[in-house]
Amino acid sequence: MTSFVLASASPARLAVLRSAGVEPVVRVSGVDEDALIAALGADAAPEHVVTELARAKAKDVLPVLARDGISDAVIVGCDSMLLIDGALQGKPGTVDVARERWSSMAGRSATLLTGHSVLRITEGTVVGDAHDHSATVVHFASPPDADLEAYLATGEPLQVAGAFTLDSLGGWFVDRIEGDPSSVIGIGLPLVRRLLADVGVGVAELWATSGRGD
């Protein structure tokens, strides 16, 4: 039976998959994102950057699966970044950086790009791969200073792309989106469905293996 492997530590991505009937095997990649972005160069298209990050994350867990004896699986890697004013923004990491980003985002719109990569392995060998990105326009509210400071104090925006969430506290400060909400959360179900089909895997097969994750 085919295992579904999520190459991410994101609880939001895990929640999306679980709500969609899939209990994935979680194996976290150790990709140095900053180094890879630097290697791609300053002229790399934003869509290319997020897609290459997703591909690297999916490939990075291959040796771990071999060690764990998982030889028949689909691996999904993802990476999200916010595109605003022509620049990509990842996780802010600190309150000061998150505050600065919100000062530029408030009352405006930006595009959340999420790269997706799917690898199909059979008997331990990669037999198929597919990758693409999704783009969703996010329209941000202008939260009052007190609300924004309270949000920053929760720590939530520090470790998420663009310093906001759609499915948790940050959802209060998103007026609307144009596109796939699941991709804003971190893993776009419509796009993953298409990529799975490209490597010969149907969604119903993944429902059948639900509960095999650990």
Image (tube, rainbow, N blue to C red):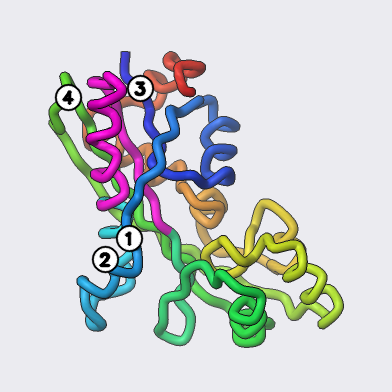
- Between 211 and 67, which is closer to the camera in this rendering? 67
- Distance in Å between CA atoms under marks 1 and 2: 6 Å
Q: What secondary structure is marked by label 4?
A: loop
Which amino acid does the dot numbered 2 rest on? Answer: Leu
Q: Position of residue 203 (x, y in %)?
A: 39, 26
Say which mark, if any, is on residue 3. Answer: 3
Which amino acid does the dot numbered 1 rest on? Answer: Asp
Q: Nearer the viewer, mark 1 or mark 4?
A: 1
Q: What secondary structure is marked by label 2?
A: helix
Q: Position of residue 158 (x, y in %)?
A: 61, 66
Instruction: Check disc 2 and report the residue beneath it.
Output: 36
Q: At 50% across and 25% down in the image, what residue appears?
A: 23
Q: Mark 2 and mark 1 in contact (Cβ < 8 Å)?
A: yes
Instruction: Check disc 4 and report the residue beneath it.
Output: 124
108 w.r.t. 126: above or below: below
The range drawn in magenta is: 56-79
Instruction: Check disc 1 and report the residue beneath it.
Output: 32
Graded by Cα atoms within 10 Å as few (under 14), some (14 to 19) or many (20 or more), the crowding at tag 1 reads: few
Quarter of the figure that contains the N terminus: top left
- Distance in Å between CA atoms under marks 3 and 1: 26 Å
- Between 2 and 124, which is closer to the camera in this rendering? 124
Q: Is residue 128 magenta?
A: no
Q: What secondary structure is marked by label 3?
A: strand
Q: What secondary structure is marked by label 1?
A: loop
Q: Nearer the viewer, mark 4 or mark 3?
A: 4
* First-in-chain label (4 vs 2): 2
- Distance in Å between CA atoms under marks 4 and 3: 12 Å
- Distance in Å between CA atoms under marks 3 and 2: 28 Å
Graded by Cα atoms within 10 Å as few (under 14), some (14 to 19) or many (20 or more), the crowding at tag 4 reads: some
